[in-house]
Amino acid sequence: MTKIQPIIAGFLSIHVKQIQVNVSSFTKLLYNGAMKIPKRIQPLVNDGLVDEVISQLMSGKEATVFMVRCGEEIRCAKVYKEANKRSFSKAAQYQEGRKGRNSRRARAMEKGSKYGRNQQEQAWQNAEVDALYTVAEAGVRVPQPFGCFDGVLLMELITDEAGDVAPRLNDVLMSKEQAIEDHQLVMIYVMRMLCAGVVHGDLSEFNVLVDEYGPVIIDMPQAVDASANNNAKAMLIRDVENMTNYYGQFAPELLLSKYALEMWALYESGELTSKTQLTGLFAESNVAANVDDVIEEINAAFIEEQDRLQRIAEANEID
């Protein structure tokens, strides 16, 4: 062996090792492109419901949303934050009117015991699934849910025409004509939700996605029962005003409409149907309120509160 051969051998050895390192790095980049599996999603991976977590899409006041692969499908996994980590204010207003599945659970939720808090948390998480199924059946465009598992909601990923994640409405610019058309469609969706007994409760340009077919309503864990929640009318008005104010940037004439008041008046009178032709017009009544009716409602609310306190007292005695 000549003196130069060991030098060549050493040179080749160094470069072979460098190539191996580069190939290894490339392989990791290629096959480990998915992010680390979040702790809350790991049980779904273990059960075969999720195969891969691709990326985090967003983190909000009540949940964090991830893009995941389920077999051949790309879906969303919405991981609800625990009650003590949610920054969603006035949650009690939204939970009013939600019924427990049985009397024991209802009493526990009213009492605020550990079991009751767990039941309340499950009710909060399941509320969105129930609302999505309800409004979808009523003809409202929402992501298709695939079930809620241990506080993780699997649902359809809404994409745009190019196959990318669909933008939120607040990131979309449009013509006056498009704004009027989309606003009308959203008003129809709000009306259909109300006909199904549901008020979104947090509807705004931040909770609407836009795909090639138009607006898609999202984020419904705070949806309320229109007939059982005393705040339903105020929430409906706020929902409609939020949407009207956004579209009104592109079509100012929309700002003069009164769809919420029109819808609620028809709903209260039992005349609202999914086929009602809304006009956006409403003449507010100047007739003074019937004092006797108001007093009767106050007395009824007082009696209901007394009954609730009695149930709590009885539950405490049983425990």
Image: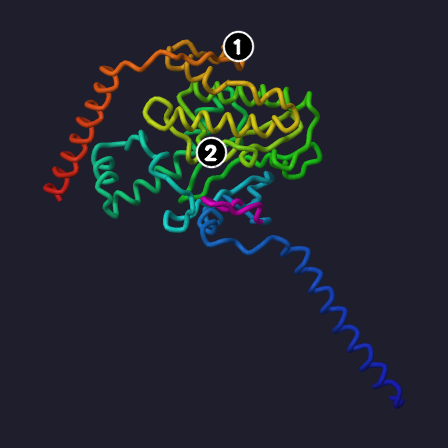
Which of disc 2 and disc 1 is earlier in sequence? 2
Horizontal side of residue 279 vs 84, given as left or right = right
What is the x, y in percent for residue 220? Answer: 46, 33
CA gap, disc 1 and disc 2: 24 Å
Residue located beneath label 1 in the image: 277
Name the image quarter holding the C terminus: top left
Q: Residues within 10 Å of mark 1 (few under 14, many from 20)?
A: few
Name the image quarter holding the N terminus: bottom right
Q: Amino acid at mark 1?
A: Gln
What residue lies at 42% left-to-right and 31% top-to-bottom? 223
Q: Main secondary structure of the magenta part?
A: strand
What residue lies at 67% left-to-right and 23% top-to-bottom? 178
Q: Is residue 63 above or below residue 141?
A: below
- Which secondary structure, mark 1? loop
Horizontal side of residue 110 vs 86, given as left or right = left
- Magenta part of the protein: which range? 56-65
Q: Which mark is residue 238?
A: none
What is the x, y in percent for residue 67? Answer: 57, 44
Question: Do the numbered discs 1 and 2 sit on residues whose CB atoms are within 8 Å?
Answer: no
What is the x, y in percent for residue 27? Answer: 69, 60
Q: Residue furthest left?
A: 317
Q: Amino acid at mark 2?
A: Asp
Front position in the image: 16 or 62: 62
What residue lies at 16% left-to-right and 35% top-to-bottom? 309
Count of labels in the image: 2
- Which secondary structure, mark 2? loop
What is the x, y in percent for residue 93? Answer: 35, 35
Horizontal side of residue 16 vs 170, given as left or right = right
Q: Is residue 81 magenta?
A: no
What residue lies at 42% left-to-right and 20% top-to-bottom? 196
Residue located beneath label 2 in the image: 202
Q: Residue furthest bottom?
A: 3
